[in-house]
Amino acid sequence: MSNVFEYAPAPESRAVVDIKPSYGLFINGEFTDGRGTSFKTVNPATEEVLAEVAEASDTDVDEAVKAARRAYTRVWSRMSGAERAKYLYRIARIIQERGRELAVLESIDNGKPIKESRDVDVPIVAAHFFYYAGWADKLKYAGYGETPLGVAGQVIPWNFPLLMLAWKIAPALACGNTVVLKPAETTPLTALLFAEICQQADLPPGVVNIVTGAGDTGRAIVSHPDVDKVAFTGSTEVGKAIARAVAGSDKKVTLELGGKAANIVFDDAPLDQAVEGIVNGIFFNQGHVCCAGSRLLVQESVADEVMARLKRRMATLRVGDPLDKNTDVGAINSAEQLAKIRELSEIGEAEGAERWSAPCELPANGYWFAPTVFTGVSQAHRIAREEIFGPVLSVLTFRTPSEAVEKANNTPFGLSAGVWTDKGSRILSMANRLRAGVVWANTFNKFDPTSPFGGYKESGYGREGGRHGLEGYLKPITTGGDR
Ligand code: NAD
């Protein structure tokens, strides 16, 4: 008998989800077929086609906006904040009740490990609805007025499909707006399940409309003349196009775009904890995280030690079936994204950085990329400047705090940063000098609905979450809103 343990997979059951062969659009409280074509959504871990999903045409988008306008004028903007809160609380509770179903579906459609969708995404989604439910009848204390904008057009990416939906829909509804939301084309299924939850919660028809499709559908939403507010999360490139498209209109806009965060490790940091933070910073959600700590800045005196511990830790990461409860790193979301990660990694090697990938066996089907680290990276390298949006870490070194700040800020982005040190005074001084919307100290990738999130520079403008997240959905007090 061998003493070697065979790995025993612990997959979560798929039986809890009911994936239909085809999905329509959710307009005015009902599922309709749509007038456009359709597209397939695929399980990135297996390449299995999950369902055929309607691609909303301009006419469909127009219908959704009309439904949202009707619901806004006749019902939602007239309802008291306390009444709106009841619906938001109800949605939050249903999300908790159906949490396992949502988590399994998210992992199947997106490729993220079940332990993340179950323990991170879904609980924060519910928390977001609870949190903004609490604000709905207290807007006058928030300091941003109490007058909603009207119809919000919201377009979200594929990396946190349900969480980005919650970040958009919960504050919009709490403030009295109605919404037309488009999920990303590779991850539409949990948004459509959320539409069912709206029905289950008896949300008045038209308050939430979900239209599926790709870039053209997104464009039709943001450029629709009867949309008062555009909320976009996605790439900087598309964000810039949207800013241009709405320039000159009186639409209010918030943009949550890309990032290239520095995770800065000083020589007095507790190194094992820092290594956990580095791993969490770049390999959480396969690195498909706008605020991922994709640039490790490590103080020269501990660089060799940190790298040795990091590689040892990376070698223990379990890459594979997203539904296995032990999986740490799941599938890359799409073939296109995998191609982008591969291309930029090859460029990194060609530019002279040294590549090391964790020795792990990758499944035969699906889209996979082994956790990878590049050392010997300089500021000029493209892997240090561009967002890779995958499980790829670039390592640079520094000698002094000033050099760390200079390198960290030497990027067109400004979304997040991490600081690892034993000294509280250094944490405060670094946080003041880093141009990033969020600075985590001795931790990374921590999210909470009470805390505002958003960027500087090419990472966008506006804040989501917290009291600040209400501002983007209310008429400014000084320009005709209430006092
Ligand atoms: P993307 O910009 O390609 O797509 C985002 C969404 O926009 C999708 O729903 C897409 O269909 C839609 N879209 C595409 N072209 C459009 C157009 N011309 N007009 C309107 N809508 C259009 O981004 P992605 O690849 O899905 O997501 C990854 C990006 O999102 C990364 O850059 C990441 O940093 C960013 N992101 C940012 C945050 C944040 O809070 N700052 C959060 C998550 C992701």
Image (tube, rainbow, N blue to C red):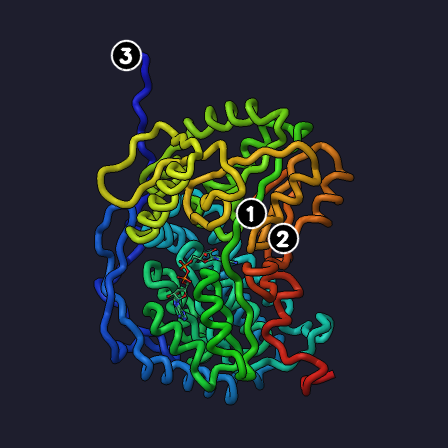
Task: Say which amino acid is labelled 3.
Answer: Ser
Q: In the image, is residue 459 above or below residue 69?
A: above
Q: Looking at the image, is mark 1 or mark 3 earlier in the sequence?
A: 3
Along the line of sight, the residue nearer the viewer: 355 or 221 = 355
Q: Residue at x 71, y 32 (%)?
A: 422
* Whole-percent x, y for residue 258 in the image: 50, 56
Q: For ligand 1, which image quadrant applies? A: bottom left
Task: Tell me if mark 1 has few (under 14), some (14-19) or many (20+) residues whose alpha carbon lies within 10 angstroms of its own.
Answer: many
Q: Looking at the image, is mark 1 or mark 2 earlier in the sequence?
A: 1
Q: Is mark 3 within 8 Å of ligand 1?
A: no
> Mark on residue 2?
3
Q: Nearer the viewer, mark 1 or mark 3?
A: 1
Task: Say which amino acid is labelled 2.
Answer: Ala
Q: Residue at x 64, y 71 (%)?
A: 471
Disc 3 on helix, strand or loop?
A: loop
Q: CA distance from mark 1 to mark 3?
A: 46 Å
